[in-house]
Amino acid sequence: MTKVSVIVAVYNMEKHLRQCVESVLAQTLKDVEVVCVDDVSTDGSLQLLHALAQEDSRVKVVEQQVNGGAQLARNAGILASCGEFITVLDDDDWLAPDALELAVKEFDGRDDVECVLLKEMRVRPDGSVFYPEGRWEFREAKGEEVFYHSMPWHVSGRYLVRRPLQLRILYDNADRVYGEDNTALLHFLESPYIIQSQGIYYYRLLDESLSHAMNMAIFGGLKSHVAMSGHLRHYSLSVRSAHEHFRWLMVVNAIRHLYLYGRRYYSAEQRKEAWQLIRDDYDSVDWDLVPEKQLRKFGYMPLRSSWTLFRLQEWLYFTLKWLTRRI
C-alpha cells in the first residue's frame, strides 16, 4: 500500500497543472502517488497528464467520460487510489516540499486521529503569499469542535484523511463547488481528534475561479446546506442545531448578495433562479433548531406565514443597512 494518495480533479488547467503534479512528485516523502482525473478537459490538460505519467510511474491518469464536476472526479480518483492516507489537491494549487511528510508524522501512534490538517497559504495573482485572517489556531482539538469552527470557514479544508474514513464518506456532489465542504465537515465529525500540521498547502486565487467569481455558484451553494441537514440527521442535537443556525445565516447572506449585486451582475432569469434556491433552503430549515434569539432579530425573522412578507422584510432590512452605511 502506498503511504499517501493525492487526488487531483483536472479540468482545463493546462497552465498550472505541471506545477501542481510536480509538487507532489518532489515531496520529501517519496512513497506517494498522484491520481489525476481528467474531467473531459478541452485544452491540453489530458495530453499533459499522459506525458507526466510517462515521466514518473507514480502518476496515474483516470479519464472521465462525462464532465460531472470536481466532486465526482475526486471520487473516481479515490476509488482508483491505493494510499493509506488520502488528500485532494486542486489542479491549480501546489504543496510545499515537506507538506506530506509533516502531515503523515502526526498520525504516528494516534489511532484516535482520522484527519490531519495542512496549513493553507493563499497566493494572489501577483504571486504574493498571505495567511487568511480569522483562522482558528490550534494544535490539537476534538473533531466536533473543529466542525463548529469549520462552518464559517475558520479552519482549513485541506487535510489528509485515513483511507477507511475517506471510502466510507466520499465527496458530496449536492453542489459542484461547495459540496466538498459537506465532506470535510463529516470527516471532522467522525475524527475523535484532529491535529493541525505545519505542512503547507498553497491555494492559488484566480479571478476566474468558480468559488470567487460573481456567478450562480454563490446561490448553488445553498443546495449543499440542504443536503448537509440530511447527512446530519443521526448526529447530536448540538451538531444539528449549530448547522441549522449557520445555514439560516447563509440564507440571509445570499439575499444580501442578491440585494447588492443582483441587477448589476445577474439577468432576470438568474435572479429568479437565485430566489428559488433561496426559498428551497428557507423552506427546509428546521426552525426548532435555530436559536430563538436569532429568529427574533429584524432581518432574521422567518415570517413563515408569508414568503412575500419575508422578502419585503429582507429588502427593507438591507435598504436600512445601506442607508446607514452598515452594509
Image: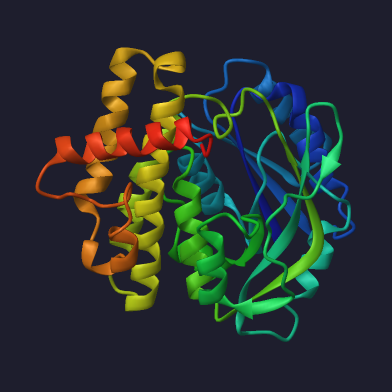
- Residue 250, horizontal then vertical, whole percent: 41, 47
Q: Quadrant of residue 217?
A: top left
Q: Quadrant of residue 263?
A: top left
Left or right: residue 78 compared with residue 200: left
- Please tell me whether residue 135 is drawn above or below residue 197 in the rendered image: above
- Residue 30, horizontal then vertical, whole percent: 85, 57
- Please tell me whether residue 226 is drawn above or below residue 19 in the rendered image: below
- Residue 56, horizontal then vertical, whole percent: 81, 40
Left or right: residue 215 compared with residue 234: right
- Residue 122, horizontal then vertical, whole percent: 76, 43
At 83% from the left and 35% from the top, the residue drawn is 55
- Please tell me whether residue 199 is drawn above or below residue 116 in the rendered image: above
| Residue situated furthest left in the rendering | 305
- Please tell me whether residue 231 is drawn above or below residue 211 in the rendered image: below
Q: Quadrant where the N terminus lies?
A: bottom right
At 64% from the left and 78% from the top, the residue drawn is 141
- In this rendered view, identify the residue nearer to me: 6 or 156: 156
Q: Residue 68: in sight, yes or no?
A: no
